[in-house]
Image (cartoon, rainbow, N blue to C red):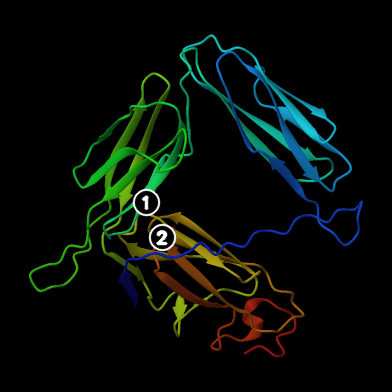
Amino acid sequence: MVALAGCGGGDDDTPTPPSPVNPDNPGTNYTLVLSPTSLSFESNGGQQTVTVTTNASAWTVESSQSWCKAEKSGDRVKVTAESNATQQQRTATITVKITGSTIQQSINVTQTNSSGQYCQADIPDEFVFNCEPTGIGFVLNTNIDQFQVTSSEAWCTAKVTDIPNATDKKQLFIEVADYQKKDSQGYYVNELPRKATITVTGGTVFSHTITIVQNSHIYFTIRTFLYPFVNGSLVLSPEGETKEVMIDTNCYSWTPKTEADWLTVKCIDNSTLSVTSKARDANDNTLRTGSVYIECDSDLYINITINVRDADSGIQGEDYGYDNPTGWD
């Protein structure tokens, strides 16, 4: 049985995909840079421009909202906002796309309501903390002076504060207490994740609710019964098949990954991992091996590795249904 426990932090190593090649200039990739990438309008509207820097010969621009007009003007985008007579702040997204490519960039547009107040913030609907006492801040682009912040649980606190030397910017800072309980013998108690709800409101202009999840001290166990594991490895038929691996964990969420191109992995639910192999060419007798990695949430350093192979030394080649079993283990 494989079992690991712990909590901590780590970086997201997801690689950035390369840009598509620019056919107008062989040997180079498309480039697209917008400046600025966000615009703010007062309630009476107006016009502003964004500079487009690109090596592409053609590009297009479109707006997500009818009150916000966007049009090309040389190497610039003219953005025109109509007057906002409502009591609500409104937003729009302008998208610049390179013609014949998937490359695109966005401009975020915010317009104040008739009172002149605005608030723009990129706050997720849910955020997961590890078991340690820590905090995180989210920037509010706003001219609102006072915000109301509430929390449903005492172990999770939040407040909006000014950012030093920053104009029209504040910070929503959320903190969680320590969640590493120990029993009378000094061993960690593996509690289930706990949740809190934070609500931040800025008058009638802004309101957002975020669910905060905090993991306890994590345990993660893979049930290594005789089947489907053989000698510590998950065995899949070279003809292609899917097997499920049962997981025991108190981790709020986890993600399976693999670098093996013949494997596909999926989290069915929090207790079930699905591993699928592609069919191997009948003329290829090479033993395929690979690994499945399981990461617990985005900021936990727990990494579980499952070894996978597609041949069983106790089975003859003809048992797999291949016409030519020569060379099988």
Q: Vertical placement of 138 versus 201: above or below?
A: below
Q: Is residue 143 left or right of residue 103?
A: left
Q: Earlier in the sequence, mark 1 or mark 2?
A: 1
The kind of residue tagged 2 is Asp
Q: Quadrant of the C terminus?
A: bottom right
The kind of residue tagged 1 is Val
Q: Position of residue 295 (x, y in %)?
A: 44, 64
Looking at the image, which residue sits at the far front? 165
Q: Is residue 181 left or right of residue 108?
A: left
**Res 241 seen here:** yes
Residue under circle 2? 299
**Res 103 seen here:** no
Could you tell me which residue is drawn at 46 percent across and 66 percent down?
294
Q: Position of residue 218 (x, y in %)?
A: 30, 64
Q: Nearer the viewer, residue 117 or 274?
A: 117
Q: Vertical placement of 242 versus 83: above or below?
A: below
Q: Determine which quarter of the picture holds residue 200.
A: top left
Q: Position of residue 256 (x, y in %)?
A: 49, 63
Looking at the image, which residue sits at the far top? 85
Could you tell me which residue is drawn at 32 percent across and 48 percent down?
213
Q: Position of residue 215 (x, y in %)?
A: 30, 56
Helix, strand or loop at disc 1? strand
Q: Is residue 227 left or right of residue 316?
A: left
Helix, strand or loop at disc 2? loop
